[in-house]
Amino acid sequence: MKTLIKDITTIQTGLFAKPTGFGELVYLQSKHFDEYGQLHSVLHSDLGAKGITEKHLLKDGDVLFAAKGTKNFAAVFENHNEPSVASTSFFVIRPTNNKVLPQYLAWFLNNQTTLTLLKGQAIGTSIPSISKQVLENLEITIPSIETQKAILHITKLRNKEKTLKQNIETLREKQIHQQIINAINRYHG
């Protein structure tokens, strides 16, 4: 089934706030994520809850889409994180039906073809920005839930394979380096 993202989600912008370094909420910013959209730092509550409305609090399964700058990515917010709000760097995309998994939506948005399409419609020169309208009118193909789960499983396995290959390459480099050092030491020994 093909549909527009706006027909299966609600999209709102993140909140503009100044973190104080302490408080009851985490103020999620792009810097908290790596280039793959994974949280890479320990989160600390750095924003007071005063004046923050319920609609800005992130819910389990919200998809955060970093729409500003050159590092665009989507990440799924999970409830085991601290109570949080998203910064204005993000659009908060909340699925409105059970036909699409938040993880599949994030996978679709992180797909290189989708990102290229979105970046091609970004506005601004010094800090490119993808507009809410562009995101809302993005067409998405939604397969069955079983197929979505299979896609996510394959992607997880592929990412694991990439990590293992990188680790093997790093170990191989160390091994070769050590063999060269040993050969040099034997020669001078």
Image: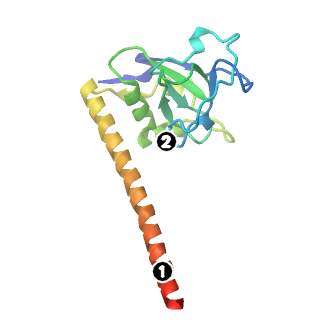
Q: Indicate the quadrant where residue 102 lies.
A: top left
What residue sits 62% from the left and 24% below the top? 26
Left or right, 84 with reference to 164: right
Q: Which residue is mark 2?
A: 36
Mark 1 closeness class: few <14, some 14–19, many ≥20 residues within 10 Å: few
Report helix, strand or loop for mark 1.
Answer: helix
Q: How many marks?
A: 2
Residue 115 spot, x, y in % from top left:
48, 39
Type of residue at label 2? Answer: Tyr
Query: Does the image show residue 179?
Result: yes
Residue 59 spot, x, y in % from top left:
50, 17
Q: Is residue 150 above or below residue 92?
A: below
Question: Of 31 and 104, which appears nearest the observer?
Answer: 31
Circle nearer the N terminus (1, 2): 2
Residue 175 spot, x, y in % from top left:
43, 70
Q: CA distance from mark 1 to mark 2?
A: 38 Å
Left or right, 138 with reference to 85: left
Question: Of 135 and 86, which appears nearest the observer?
Answer: 86
What residue sits 53% from the left and 39% below the top? 119
Q: Which residue is mark 1?
A: 182
Query: Does the image show residue 144?
Result: no
Residue 187 spot, x, y in % from top left:
50, 90
